[in-house]
């Protein structure tokens, strides 16, 4: 669907955020989310057995999971920075990202970070991801809402 996928910790206190999700037909819990620390993210990524994890630190910190030579096993590339409070604020970048891989990462992070919203960059279609999300259903609904907004 996109090249860039935004990641937003759920913030039910932000009226604009709530209004946007409501307008998109996304119901959400009152729980508040946060970005993970880099260590929390790396802990989750190491749960993907057999997939390499690489971190490159410069002005932007890039973290990759998987290998571009074998995308079927899963791939995700995250770009971000460390905030003043020590969290890794990131988004998914590149067309090679697997949607199921991105959603699985966020689902596993939500156990200790709270809910997230994954947003594709083309039309900003959001998908709520919590620790209880059935990813197959959520991804199908996400695609359906995208197709409704942008019919072929």
Image (cartoon, rainbow, N blue to C red):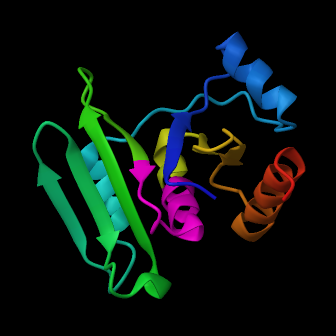
Residue at 38% x, 87% y: name it.
Answer: 70
| Number of numbered discs on residues | 0
Residue 113 located left or right of residue 78: right
* Residue 79 forms part of the magenta stretch: no
Residue interval drawn in magenta: 92-108
Percent position of residue 41, x then y: 34, 53
Foreground residue among 66 and 111: 66
The spot of residue 150 in percent (x, y) is 82, 49
Instruction: Find residue 16 and report its image quarter.
Output: top right
Is residue 77 positioned above or below 84 on the image? Answer: below
Residue 125 at x, y = what percent? 71, 43
Tell me residue 13's x, y (percent): 66, 14
In front here: 85 or 89? 89
Furthest residue toward left: 58
Which residue is at 70% across, 65% downward? 135
Q: Quadrant of the N terminus?
A: bottom right
In the picture, measured across the screen, residue 33 lies left or right of residue 144, that is left
């Amino acid at each position: 669907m996109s090249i860039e996928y935004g990641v937003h910790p759920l913030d039910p206190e932000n009226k604009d955020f709530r209004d946007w999700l409501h307008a998109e037909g996304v119901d959400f819990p009152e729980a508040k989310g946060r970005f993970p620390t880099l260590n929390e993210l790396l802990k989750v990524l190491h749960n993907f057995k057999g997939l390499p994890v690489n971190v490159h630190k410069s002005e932007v910190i890039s973290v990759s999971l998987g290998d571009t030579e074998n995308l079927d096993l899963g791939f995700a590339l995250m770009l971000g920075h460390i905030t003043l409070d020590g969290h890794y604020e990131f988004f998914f970048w590149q067309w090679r990202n697997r949607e199921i891989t991105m959603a699985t990462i966020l689902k596993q992070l939500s156990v200790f970070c709270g809910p997230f919203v994954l947003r594709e960059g083309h039309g900003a279609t959001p998908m709520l991801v919590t620790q209880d999300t059935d990813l197959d259903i959520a991804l199908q609904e996400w695609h359906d809402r995208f197709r409704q907004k942008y019919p072929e």
